[in-house]
Image (cartoon, grey):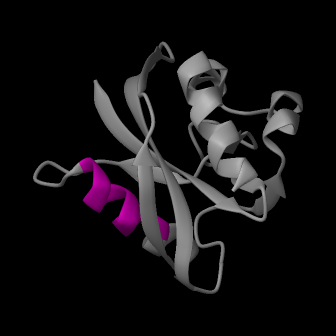
Amino acid sequence: MIEVSCALLIKGGKVLITQNGEDSDHPYQWEFPGGKVKASESDKACIEREIMEELELHVDIIEALFPIEHDYGFKKIRLIPFVCRIKSGTLKLNNHINKKWIEITALKNEDLSEADKRLIELERNKEFLKKYIRE
């Protein structure tokens, strides 16, 4: 099982999703940015590192959401989500081909990767996200 952390970056009542390129395991699908947890790394340290590498942003981790496990057939992952806010930096796409800030209710209309889709369908995660979107 591959441990993967992801950030649900919240800004102005919307969440950031990023689009994978053609060389990804999930070509052209949208996802919450993040990546694989390294062997001696905590989940929180991973998301801070990944967001800096992928988006050149420093983030504040607000809260951990409930993780999900997903089997893609060619890999099994445990997706560990964190609600985050941008602390500093200017968003730059280093690993993705597109980005958009989107309302939580509109996520169901996007071509999200299966694990990310399951993550936001989890009722407990929906409730946490609604709380942070309203702030």
Please report the bounds of the magenta region as a residue range: 43-51
Q: Name the residue located 37 percent from the left edge and 27 percent from the top edge.
A: 78
Q: How many marks can you see?
A: 0
Above/below status of 3 relative to 92: above
Side of 70 where 39 appears, left or right: left
Res 21 visible: no
Residue 95 in the magenta stretch? The answer is: no
Side of 5 where 119 appears, left or right: right
Between residues 135 and 18, which one lies in front from this camera angle? 135
Which quadrant would the C terminus be assigned to in this image? bottom right
> Where's residue 102, x and y in %?
83, 51
Above/below status of 37 relative to 80: below
Q: What main secondary structure does the magenta stretch of the protein show?
A: helix
Q: Name the residue located 82 percent from the left edge and 27 percent from the top edge.
A: 108
Side of 74 where 107 appears, left or right: right
Q: Name the residue located 31 percent from the left edge and 36 percent from the top edge.
A: 3
